[in-house]
């Protein structure tokens, strides 16, 4: 999944999200439509089997919109910026090897095209390539419950859904 919040870009949603499976777009949401929508016909089958799927995905989109709006403001403040074009992004997901059963989860945040804070899959701790993210890194690394939830999501829940999607 990709989540993006931006400021200073005309004729572009200030927030949008895109879901992908094997580099094929499966879902889309932005602040103009305020609804997560399927981008593949087979995704309609998902909603028939899981009736609350799109409602849940829409609620996630709306919640992320608010979170990303705040995160963008915080990033601009930490980088001592006021105006101009700025982009705050998150990319997360999982990969699953059907033959080896190896699972890889990832979660990365970026700001203005550069890495900001990244979850290290080996240590299950956040790393901050930029000093402006050190405060967030410390806060997130101190929240052991959230780290456990993140690990479970990326290595179990994400893979369960990936398998379901691939079967369509």
Image: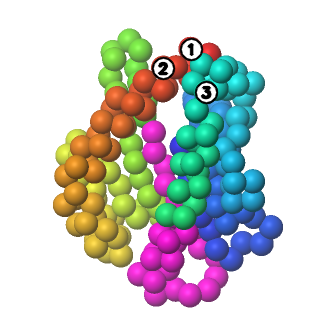
The residue at the point 42 percent across, 32 percent down is 158
Question: Which disc, if any, is residue 17?
Answer: none
Q: Position of residue 5 (x, y in %)?
A: 59, 64
Name the residue tied to disc 2: 163
Residue 142's place in the image compared with 149, above or below, is: below
Disc 3 element: loop
Q: Is 44 situated left or right of 140 in this image?
A: right
Mark 1 is surrounded, within 10 Å at the Cα level, by few (under 14), some (14 to 19) or many (20 or more) other residues, namely few
Alpha carbon of mark 2 to alpha carbon of mark 1: how far?
A: 6 Å
Residue 55 can be seen, yes or no: yes
Mark 3 is surrounded, within 10 Å at the Cα level, by few (under 14), some (14 to 19) or many (20 or more) other residues, namely few
Mark 3 or 2, nearer chain start: 3
Q: In the image, is residue 70 part of the stretch drawn in magenta?
A: yes
Q: Are marks 3 and 1 in contact (CB under 8 Å)?
A: no
The residue at the point 70 percent across, 35 percent down is 38
Name the residue tied to disc 3: 51
Give the residues drawn in magenta, as a range: 68-93
Which of the two discs, 3 and 2, sits closer to the camera? Answer: 3
Alpha carbon of mark 3 to alpha carbon of mark 1: how far?
A: 18 Å
Camera-nearest residue between 135 and 63: 63
- The image quadrant where one finds the C terminus is top right
Tell me the quarter of the picture where residue 13 sits: bottom right
Disc 2 element: helix
Disc 1 element: helix
């Amino acid at each position: 999944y990709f989540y993006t919040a931006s400021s200073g870009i005309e004729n572009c949603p200030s927030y949008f999200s895109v879901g992908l499976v094997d580099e094929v777009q499966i879902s889309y949401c932005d602040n103009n439509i305020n609804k997560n929508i399927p981008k593949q016909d087979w995704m309609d089958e998902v909603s028939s089997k899981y009736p609350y799927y799109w409602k849940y995905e829409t609620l996630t989109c709306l919640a992320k919109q608010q979170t990303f709006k705040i995160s963008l403001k915080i990033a601009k403040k930490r980088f001592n910026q006021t105006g101009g074009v700025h982009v705050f992004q998150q990319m997360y997901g999982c990969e699953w090897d059907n033959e080896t059963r190896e699972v890889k989860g990832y979660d990365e945040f970026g700001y203005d095209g550069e890495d900001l804070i990244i979850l290290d899959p080996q240590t299950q701790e956040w790393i901050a390539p930029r000093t402006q993210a050190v405060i967030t890194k410390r806060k997130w690394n101190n929240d052991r419950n959230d780290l456990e939830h993140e690990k479970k999501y990326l290595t179990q829940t994400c893979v369960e859904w990936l398998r379901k999607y691939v079967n369509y």
